[in-house]
Amino acid sequence: MNKTTSKKGFIESFFLKTLCVQNKLLGYFYPVITLKKKHRYILSILTGILLSISFPFTGSLTFVGFVALVPLLFLENYILIKRFRSLKVLTHAYISFFTYNAITTFWVWNASPGGAILAIALNSLFMAVVFYCFHLTKKYVGHKEGYISLLIYWIGFEYLHYNWEASWTWLTLGNTFSVTPALVQWYSFTGVLGGSLWILLVNLIVYRIYQNIYFNRESWKIQTPIFYTVLFVLLVPIGVSLTSYYTYIDKGNSIEVIAVQPNIDPYNEKFERGMLNKQLKKITRLAAQKITDETALIVAPETAISTPFFEQDIQRLSFFRYLSTQKNNLNNIPWYIGASTMEFFSEKNSRASMKLQSGPGYIEYYNSSLLIRRDNSTDFAHKSKLVPGVEVIPFSEYLSFLEDFSIENGGTSGTLGIEKSPQVFKTEDFTFAPVICYESIYGEWVAEQCKKGAQLICIATNDGWWKDTPGYKQHNSFAVLRAIENRRAIVRSANTGTSCFINQRGDISQATNWWEADVISGKVHLNSEQTFYTKHGNVLGRSFAFFAVLILLFTFVKRFKSKYIKS
């Protein structure tokens, strides 16, 4: 051994001994760096900012999402190595996800300041708890098991979030790709949770490279296999998706459909007394501009019939006679239109049933879809995925006093009635899925409608509550994912915001402008074939949710054993 080699070996040894500490349990060397409190907070906020700028219309820099969690993963590992209290992970994760929630969904404030505070605070907490569970598994079970558990916990959480009353699934990580449909054509197999898994997996691999270089003092050259893994995980899904995107041709026969955007102010006009006839005249006048002999359906927005009425009385109501007359004058084309409806029950039907003060019986209010066929026969479907705090008060079935805190929305407040299962509408010529507003972000719900025979998806919404913010743009972009998941064309009619057509591979056409009355007409294809996702639903979410419970139980067993042995 020459002097130069000996000197180099001595310097490396000195560096490791003085600047690094060895974790004997794991065999890793970690730099002895000290992060001041302000630096830890900066890293926490950085993850929130990176997630936000990757999200649609608060940045739309999609690929940033693949590294957004790296600062938080670094911070979690630092807290573990420094043997700080685990609750610090929960604190910093909450800061990260609060930043993410606040930047991406601040616009909820325009509809309800209280609702915005509650949604942002609680959703941030849910996400932070999931990350905290990952930390506990990593701490008490093992590093490799911990990182695997992050994938399972997060996907399990997102699945649960779609299926309980406190559901606020706007920030599902897979929604990030709603502005890049060409990259996620494989959602027809996995649904949106496949995109969430993709983001998490790439973040973990990128972090592993960072950890090896800066924590384990490995050379860049040694990371070559991991670089290949990153490229494989990134490029293979993209390659498969792009091939599918550029070779896919819309299936089924085409029909002509009209979507109306009346642009009626939801705060100062839409729900005012005596305004219904004026608003319906505006809607029919707009529709008349695009009518042709080939038009098969007219789609109008959510609560276009804004005055509540009893469903059984519809045939004798003046607005229905007006619509029927106009329909006959407009080639007798079927209408799909949103409505506020009621039903009377002699006994309590559900927790949405409100006791009448003027006599015996109960009444339920609904946010409804209404189909008026050529022969003037009608069908109703009630919105079932309700907005928490506005249309449903979570857990008020068990805590009835919570109904007192409900937010008034269009003249009604408290929990609305719902359908027990997804419904479809059948015209004389085809079957379609009636989707009302918030329901359009629930992939499995819409897939069930397609499984029941829907050849087309029609979304009626009112995005005017959020004003000119990223909210209505995000909502519209999420519909793209429903088209890909089910290979169904979409007709979207918004009171204002974005009305448009979306083809079966997720391309948006004829998108209307914000705060402009408009009407669009276009050809859409009726597809009866079912994708894997349509047939089987959220297999990924169900599977991961099951394993998440098992891993969490195992983690707590290990944690209690560890404490018992120490004591």
Image: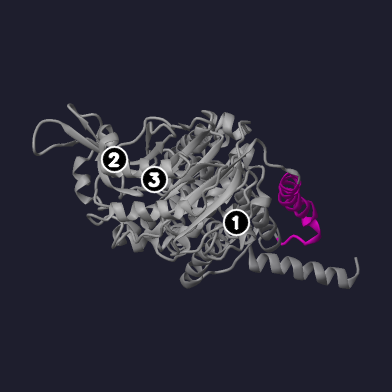
Residue 179: mark in rendering: 1
Horizontal side of 129 relative to 253 (left or right) equals left
- Tell me residue 123's x, y (percent): 41, 52
Residue at (59% x, 43% y) in the render: 489
In the rendered structure, which disc, 2 or 1, sits on the residue that comes first in sequence? 1
- The question of residue 225 being in magenta is answered with yes
Amino acid at pointer 1: Val
- The question of residue 429 being in magenta is answered with no
Residue 326: mark in rendering: 3
Amino acid at pointer 3: Gln
Which residue corresponds to mark 2? 341
Distance in Å between CA atoms under marks 3 and 2: 21 Å
Name the mark nearer the viewer: 2 or 1: 2
- Tell me residue 246's x, y (percent): 75, 48
- The residue stretch that appears in magenta: 217-246
Name the mark nearer the viewer: 1 or 3: 3
Amino acid at pointer 2: Thr
In the rendered structure, which disc, 1 or 3, sits on the residue that comes first in sequence? 1
Residue at (66% x, 61% y) in the render: 215
